[in-house]
Amino acid sequence: MRITLLLLALGLTVSAGDSESSPASPSSTETSQDPAKPADPAPPPAPPAKYNGWVFSILADGYVTKNFNTPSSNFNQLQNFNFTSGRPELSLAKFTVDKSDKVFGIHADIGAGETMRWIHLADPAAAEHKALRFIEQAYVIVKPNNTHGTEFDFGQFVTSAGAEVIESSSNWNYTRSLLFGWAIPYYHFGLKTTTPVTKELNVGFQLVNAWNTLAGNNNMNNVGLTLGLTKKKYAYFANYYTGPNHQGTTKGKRNLFDTTLLLTPTGKFNAYIDADFGRDNHILGGGHDSWYGVAGAARYQLTKQFAIAGRLEAFNDKDGFNTGVAQVVKEGTITGEYKLNDHLIGRLEYRHDASDKPYFDRNRLIAVEKSLDTFTVGLIVLLGPWK
């Protein structure tokens, strides 16, 4: 649903409502004796698809970030996928293949770069089999006949939670929000279903492993419930995940509720509000760790090539479960985008993070600053799709 949300946000154009016109009446000079016009020749058949239904595409995403705290580690704390400061880096390069026929299909995203290393960091399967670190998504698709559009996906797929996605090209800002990086999972492995209840309402069910786990941690013991409602001027999404996530035991369930409201009042202006609440129960003692946050963002298309986007958010890592420190972090970001064409996108971004605790490094000193300012230049190349 996250991908649906961002595609709606970036591509949806709302019309003002075209007036219906009735067919023109015959001219008074026309009579029933006029000879009938010959039928128009049938259009030539469409050329066959070049790749027989297969679709291929390539994405490359690189950046350079200036960290104004100049930490000796050159690490941009609390940011996702643009970790390194002071030198150009490859965030993500990936190849996508997709084939979705009437009943069966397949989808795979194979990539490299800092993004792929980070999302698999805690996956026991990827630690044992390093080749798995190159897989962002890989699943089969089944759409049975006579099920009114129900789809079943099995394999590794990105999470349904959140307002942003892994690929920066599909987000409004270049850097990811605190909620994306610290409140929700990146991906799941298991079974995902989606069913259209009406033209506007979709519901789904997921039976998956622990968060960000291909194998080796509570396999198929987590449940996900999803809902999506799409209207002309807005869309609403809700996701709930529950299940054990502590390795080696089924005790201590983790619960996450995620909800997003996307506003699409015009073709040029869009906005969203995203909220998350998470709770991880302890294995022993009956206690728990919790976190919650809210983010709001807006994007305005100034011209065909230029756009500007802003984001504000607050994240309370109440028990330090995600960031390692019990803290409240607030973040503000402003992003300018220049889209040369459908294949080349450049972004300039300023971001300010502020904590209520000394958390950020400065020079050689560790956890001495309460704030961090960064400036990022990102360049995104999109090739394809080839069909």
Image: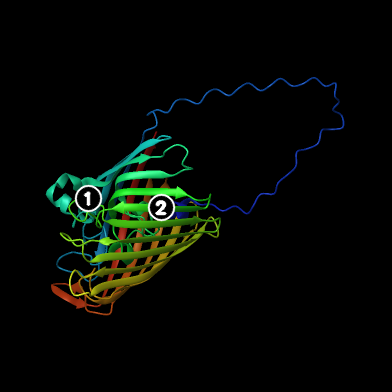
> Residue 31: x and y, percent?
86, 25
The residue where tag 1 is placed is 214
Residue 245 x %, y %: 22, 61
| Left or right side of 22 for 360 | left
Local crowd size for mark 1, using a 10 Å CA cut-off: few (<14), some (14–19), many (≥20):
many
Please name whichever residue, 375 or 77, is drawn nearer the observer in this view of the structure. Answer: 77
Given residues 188 and 313, the one toward you in this image is 188
Label 2 neighbourhood size at 10 Å, few (<14), some (14-19), many (20+)? many
Residue at image coords 33%, 60%: 241
Exactly how many numbered labels are in the figure?
A: 2
Residue kind at label 1, given as amino acid type: Leu
Q: Nearer the viewer, residue 197 or 20?
A: 197
* Residue at x 22%, y 78% (from the top left corner): 358
User: Can I make out residue 167 in this image?
Assistant: no
Residue annotated with mark 2: 204
In this rendering, the label closer to the viewer, 2 or 1: 2
Relative to 127, is 66 above or below? below
Q: Earlier in the sequence, mark 2 or mark 1?
A: 2
> What residue do we see at 54% from left, 52% from top?
13
Amino acid type at image mark 2: Gly
Looking at the image, residue 345 lies above or below residue 243: above
How far apart are the alpha carbons under marks 2 and 1?
Answer: 21 Å
The image position of residue 276, as x and y in percent, is 36, 67
| Image quarter hosting the C terminus | top left
Relative to residue 87, is residue 351 drawn left or right?
right
Q: Secondary structure at mark 1?
A: loop
- At 21% from the left edge and 64% from the top edge, which residue is drawn? 251
Name the residue nearer the viewer: 48 or 260: 260
- Residue 128 in the image, given as x and y percentages of width and height: 12, 49
Q: Looking at the picture, does residue 107 appear above or below residue 260?
A: above
